[in-house]
Amino acid sequence: MGGRNGLSSPCLPRLPFLLFLLLLSVAVLTVAASENENKGSSLSASEAEAAVSRFREYLRINTSQPDPDYDAAVRFLRAQADDLGLESDVLEFVSGKPLLLLRWVGRIPSLPALLLNSHTDVVPTEPLKWAHPPFSAALDPATGNLYARGSQDMKCVGLQYLEAIRRLRAAGFAPDRTIYLSFVPDEEIGGNDGAGRLAASEKFQEMKVGVELDEGLASPGEEYRVFYGERSPWWLVIKARGAPGHGAKLYDGSAMENLMKSVEAVRRFRAAQFDLVKAGMKAEGEVVSVNLVYLKAGTPSPTGFVMNLQPSEAEVGLDIRVPPNANTEALERRIAEEWAPSSRNLTFEFKHKVSVHDMFGKPAITPADNSNPWWMLLEEAVKKANGKLGKPEIFPASTDARFFRERGIPAFGFSPMANTPILLHDHNEFLNKHEYLKGIEIYESIIKAFASYKGDAKDEESRAEL
Ligand SMILES: [Zn+2]
């Protein structure tokens, strides 16, 4: 402004004007540079920098299984919550496994609450196979890629929720419904002691959760991926028995031969399912996947295995993943009659078997169409923030969302990472900082839409009357 005032000075008309032009061009260039830096983000350069540095701080906390530093994570997150003025509570359903629950009370507490869930643990790493130490949160200045275990799965989402809330609070937004944020332990080892305990707790009943958001997957394309259900793990062990015999003798019904016949049947089924995916007829999450995870047989000797003896027992372990709308009766029949028939001296046992149904006997899926107002709100909110959702999918593996869907609560798996290779559980997991920042705005839009929606109030009243 000083330069502009100088324009009116009759004594030095040219120099201040030139100075003004110079300052103006510097200003224009600076704005252009910072816009470029934020790729059209509505976050200022300093806001963006602070958000990225908080993300890196969280990424540096080593919460990898099997010995996660949960206390450090909770300390860090609680400090963030204090800073934002959110209520916080540490629940320890299992000793040494703290779960941090944050709350932003809504203006109409009778409305069902919104739950934003994320897990604090990450999978182990092989540091020597990484280009940067996995807990250094190294930022490549050339690309903006942030390398760290948990950068995709799913510390990004946990902090994006908090950053979105930071912006909403700064803008004076007041939610109608109460917003909870849960930072849960142990997802990577099954989630039973984390989200599982929370969902089954009395505390959860009190929270009156009406909708839940959880993790999704990165998308290499422009569209964000979104998940409305997931496959249920069935971990199956098939055991074969047969007459033992000399290694030189040909005879029918040995344990190994019995088992191999099963393995062949399993492989045929696997190939047929896989063909549907390869032909583009079904998505990965829509078919039953079966993979052989172990084979156990043979008679041990001090130097390995006895080579001239056909053993009397053999077993195989299978990891089966079943989509929520699969015909489970047909699959069970297939297992009993084709994969492990007693007529061939085979038995089977499930080591772990999650039902594809919720507590009410319905397929555990959240409708992702116009029949579900939460879906419409989600789609609209993402669009408003200049993002695009892909076709809703079944998550190929398991997430904590299942504990909530099991209770009939609508839940979507969504991690806003487009233009990003899927590197969860992989070496050199990274997220570009611009994608991260863009995700904050996406959540800002979603949280705003969900927390302002009052359409389910009537449903709740009528449910209460029942
Ligand atoms: Zn995860």
Image: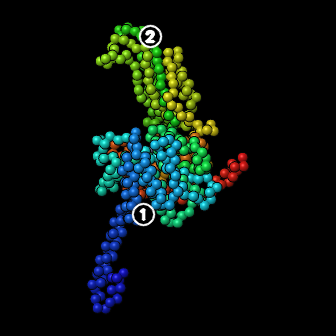
Label 1 to label 2, Cα distance in Å?
72 Å
> Disc 2 on helix, strand or loop?
loop
The answer to whether residue 183 is visible is yes
- Mark number for residue 358? none
* Rendered location of residue 260, percent (x, y): 43, 19
> In the depicted view, which residue is nearer to us: 322 or 408?
408
Question: Where does residue 21 sit, x and y in percent of width and height?
Answer: 31, 78
Which residue, given by chain and number where applicable, does mark 1 sit on? 43
Q: Nearer the viewer, residue 83 or 14?
A: 83
The residue lying furthest to the bottom in this view is 10
Mark 2 lies on residue: 243
Residue neighbourhood size for the residue with mark 2, other residues' Cα within 10 Å, grouped as few (<14), some (14–19), many (≥20): some
Q: Quadrant of the image for the N terminus?
A: bottom left
The amino acid at mark 1 is Leu
Dot 1: what SS?
Answer: loop
Q: Earlier in the sequence, mark 1 or mark 2?
A: 1
59 vs 1: above or below: above
Residue at horizontal 59 percent and vertical 50 percent from the top: 207
Does 183 sit above or below residue 297? below
Q: Residue at x 31, y 17 (%)?
A: 302
Could you say which quadrant of the image residue 279 lies in?
top left
Q: Is residue 13 left or right of residue 163?
A: left
